[in-house]
Image: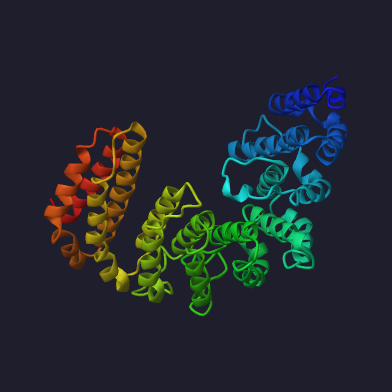
Amino acid sequence: MVCQGTSARDERIRISSFTCLHEIAANYYAKLPPYMPEVFNISVKAINEDSEEVGLQAVEFWSTLCDIELDMVDDEDPAETSHHFIAAVVPHLVPVLLKQLTKQEEGQEQDDTAWNLAMASGTCLGLLARTAEDAIVQHVMPFVTENIGKNTTPEDWRLREAATFAFGSILEGPSPHSLAEIVRQAMGFLLAAMKDPHPYVRDTTAWTIGRVFEFQHDAGNSEVPELITRETLPQVAQVLLGGLGDQVHIAVRVCDAIGRLAEGFTAYAGQSSPLSPFFKEIITNLLNASSRTDPSHTDSTRLQISAFEAINDMVRAASPDTLDTVGQLTPVFLQEIAKTFNMPVSSGEQREKQAELQGQLCGVLQVIMQKLSEVEQYKAAVLQYADQIMESLLRVFSNHTSSVHEEAMLAVGAFTYACGR
């Protein structure tokens, strides 16, 4: 009856029928095997031919099924048996989802709340990759290879973006070794695509580069093939620094990519790391990005927060030969905290904005002090600003918005440790 409802004349009934299928899958997974061939057929028909609202629910069914099978792996409950529906459906469902990736809406990359068939299909593809792991690669890469550089007509940006989105979506799940050579070859295309004429392609490319660093770059882990070396890092750094000057929503993605790049060097052993020659320049450019204002973009605050988070990641990854630069950041962020007390606070929204910014700045100050405290000789870089640090934090405590107090307290803890008392 529920399956029949997916072909009803009334769109509302079709939507509700797929919603029911989600619940049936979640609650009666063990009973699904006899019905799966029909469910596959009706869901693919809805994705390809029905309205977007119905198609979204059809895609969501497969995302729900992925979540169920992933939970089974995590829980390892002997009472629950996986039927491996996702492994069986990957060769047939992936081409359907890849087709939907090209149905982007112009400008949606600037809206984090945008949700349509292209976004839902990409999300589902990512879940398929986490569930099917290495098996998905052979079904996605031909699409990526064919379309990532396509530039014959003005509308080919859709194919380039879809190919990049597809590639970024499958980076979590398959083993690093199975993707190592593919990623190494793809890096050249991705770095070049940061100059793509279409902002949507640049936005997705920056997101994908961040995903590459997150899942394929870990310089301190011998189990992960080396991706970023002293030879390849100069080009990577140059491209990322250039991206910080792009449109705000793209610069936000670049900040995240820089943070992921830095995280990959956190466990790097030795006095110096490959990141050291670029450390000061990257920090300087992130500080500049944090103070950018863009009249065409209403959410410059998001860029500021993303830049501060990237600075935190850079500081955590700082090798001993860059701690002098880390020490120079203390007065910079004390000054930034001081500026927040001149912000307008006449409305509740303005007070909340002030508290959010103060919390971010206290968080950065905490990370700086923790890093400097790791090496005895650099604790002095904290102690020389002891009075200013405590005065600034006490002023933050006077803010009546309680959300900022936790970050300030953590900063006090880091300061106390650095002082040794």
Residue drawn at (66%, 63%) of the image: 179
Residue drawn at (15%, 54%) of the image: 388
Determine the image quadrant of residue 349. top left
Residue 165 is left or right of residue 247, and the answer is right
Residue 237 is left or right of residue 106, and the answer is left
Give the image location of residue 25, x and y in percent: 73, 28
Give the image location of residue 338, x and y in percent: 22, 51
Give the image location of residue 18, x and y in percent: 77, 28
Of 344 and 420, the residue lying toward us:
344
Q: Looking at this view, name the residue that lies furthest to the top.
A: 1
Q: Is residue 416 above or below residue 197?
A: above
Of 266 and 385, the residue lying toward us:
385
Which image quadrant: the N terminus?
Answer: top right
Residue drawn at (73%, 26%) of the image: 19
Of 162 and 132, the residue lying toward us:
162
Residue 399 is left or right of residue 256, and the answer is left
Give the image location of residue 115, x and y in percent: 65, 40
Residue 295 is left or right of residue 44, and the answer is left
Q: Looking at this view, name the residue that lies furthest to the bottom.
A: 231
Asked which colour scheme the image uses, the reply is rainbow
Determine the image quadrant of residue 64. top right
Q: How many marks?
A: 0
Determine the image quadrant of residue 59. top right
